[in-house]
């Protein structure tokens, strides 16, 4: 048993850690899914794949911590076999789900003409089918030694089956997805870099903005053309700044997605290979840590794929704070409406002033409206 091997308190500590990860992941993914369910405008083609990935994360938040904590506190053969199968199925579904989101972004950026031919429903079904296949293959058990997932009482398949299944699982659901993610996000970053270079090439030949000089009886057409020239230069510089930010954002997202997948999935796959290929006895803390890292995927995925949208951030904050659709603007309008009668009364009671007031009232700015 894990508690007898690693100390009397290490099992409950890891159970608490898994429970906290499950609660935090369920809250993050559930909040975003609830916002998607409430807001029809957010359920577009690309966000449907994000919703599919969040659904997989939500399922993993309930399965992995529950079965892991159950086997840590009350180990049994049934919880061990179901836990091993669930971990393999969740990893496979998450890998294919992330790969589908990355492929959707790739088609939207580099293949916009054929983007609408991509069907999100087929990709979502493929991710769930991959999870079912992986879970079915891992259900008989993958280890003979005492581990986080105990398999005593079950007739294990032959060692050759475990050997080839582990190789196929790691190749199909870890190595190939990670390499494909590196290729897809590398292409997206290269396209953003080309767009940035193209924008710099268009901005550089433009004439620089001259320092402002005192006007010397300039005519109105000349003033208008000068203003247009300055506005066009400012817009070009704003486009250049946007291209720089787009390139930096593409590089940052590409690195974070690949780094997260490697960190969260690699320990579980490495321990799986060590158990099935070399027959090594893995320390229980290492097995529990690999399961915790696998559960961390449900925490990082919403931040990488969902919370990048500012509109989604506003909708989640509005839902959590129980505010209406016009929270901030509504408060400002209510305060302005409540103060309007008192301001009008003060204007009526005050003595007339012949001097020009500031730009606080509407009538005082009528003379300057043409200049603005």
Image (cartoon, rainbow, N blue to C red):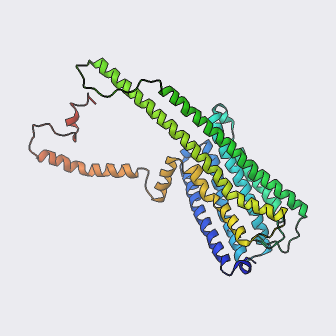
On the image, the x and y values in percent for residue 166 come to: 82, 58
Numbered marks: total: 0
**Image point (75%, 55%), residue name:** 131
> In the rendered view of the protein, which quadrant contains the N terminus?
bottom right
Q: Is residue 125 visible?
A: no
Q: Is residue 330 left or right of residue 280?
A: left
**Image point (16%, 39%), residue name:** 357
Q: Is residue 205 left or right of residue 271?
A: left
> In the rendered view of the protein, which quadrant contains the C terminus?
top left
Q: Is residue 35 above or below residue 198?
A: below
On the image, the x and y values in percent for residue 92 come to: 74, 55
On the image, the x and y values in percent for residue 58 come to: 64, 59
In this view, the residue in front, 197 or 98, is 197
Q: Is residue 272 left or right of residue 204?
A: right
On the image, the x and y values in percent for residue 362 come to: 23, 38
Q: Is residue 283 above or below residue 347?
A: below
**Image point (81%, 68%), residue name:** 280
Q: Is residue 155 visible?
A: yes
**Image point (66%, 44%), residue name:** 102
Q: Is residue 119 above or below residue 16?
A: above
Residue 103 location, quadrant: top right
């Amino acid at each position: 048993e894990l508690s007898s091997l690693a100390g009397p308190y290490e099992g409950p500590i890891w159970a608490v850690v898994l429970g906290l990860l499950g609660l935090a992941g369920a809250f993050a993914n559930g909040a975003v899914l609830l916002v998607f369910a409430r807001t029809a405008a957010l359920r577009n083609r690309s966000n449907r794949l994000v919703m599919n990935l969040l659904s997989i994360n939500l399922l993993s938040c309930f399965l992995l911590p529950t079965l892991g904590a159950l086997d840590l506190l009350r180990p049994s053969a049934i919880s061990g076999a179901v836990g091993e199968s669930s971990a393999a199925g969740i990893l496979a579904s998450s890998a294919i789900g992330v790969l589908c989101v990355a492929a959707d972004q790739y088609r939207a950026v580099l293949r916009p003409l054929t983007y609408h031919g991509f069907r999100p429903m087929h990709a979502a079904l493929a991710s769930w089918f991959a999870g079912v296949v992986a879970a079915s293959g891992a259900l008989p058990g993958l280890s003979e030694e005492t581990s986080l997932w105990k398999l005593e009482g079950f007739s294990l398949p032959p060692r050759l089956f475990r050997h080839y299944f582990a190789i196929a699982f790691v190749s199909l659901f870890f190595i190939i997805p990670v390499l494909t993610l590196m290729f897809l996000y590398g292409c997206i970053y290269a396209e953003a870099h080309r767009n940035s270079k193209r924008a710099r090439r268009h901005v550089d030949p433009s004439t620089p903005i001259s320092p402002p000089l005192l006007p010397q009886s300039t005519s109105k057409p000349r003033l208008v053309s000068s203003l247009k020239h300055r506005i066009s230069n400012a817009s070009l510089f704003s486009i250049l700044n946007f291209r720089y930010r787009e390139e930096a954002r593409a590089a940052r997202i590409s690195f974070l997605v690949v780094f997260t997948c490697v960190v969260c999935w690699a320990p579980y796959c490495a321990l799986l290979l060590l158990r099935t290929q070399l027959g090594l006895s893995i320390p229980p803390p290492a097995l529990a840590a690999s399961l915790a890292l696998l559960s961390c995927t449900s925490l990082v995925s919403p931040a990488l794929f969902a919370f990048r949208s500012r509109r989604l951030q506003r909708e989640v904050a509005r839902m959590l704070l129980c505010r209406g659709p016009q929270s901030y603007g509504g408060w400002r309008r209510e305060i302005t409406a409540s103060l309007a009668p008192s301001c009008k009364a003060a204007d009526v009671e005050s003595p007339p002033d012949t001097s020009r007031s500031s730009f606080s009232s509407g009538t005082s700015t009528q003379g300057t409206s043409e200049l603005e």
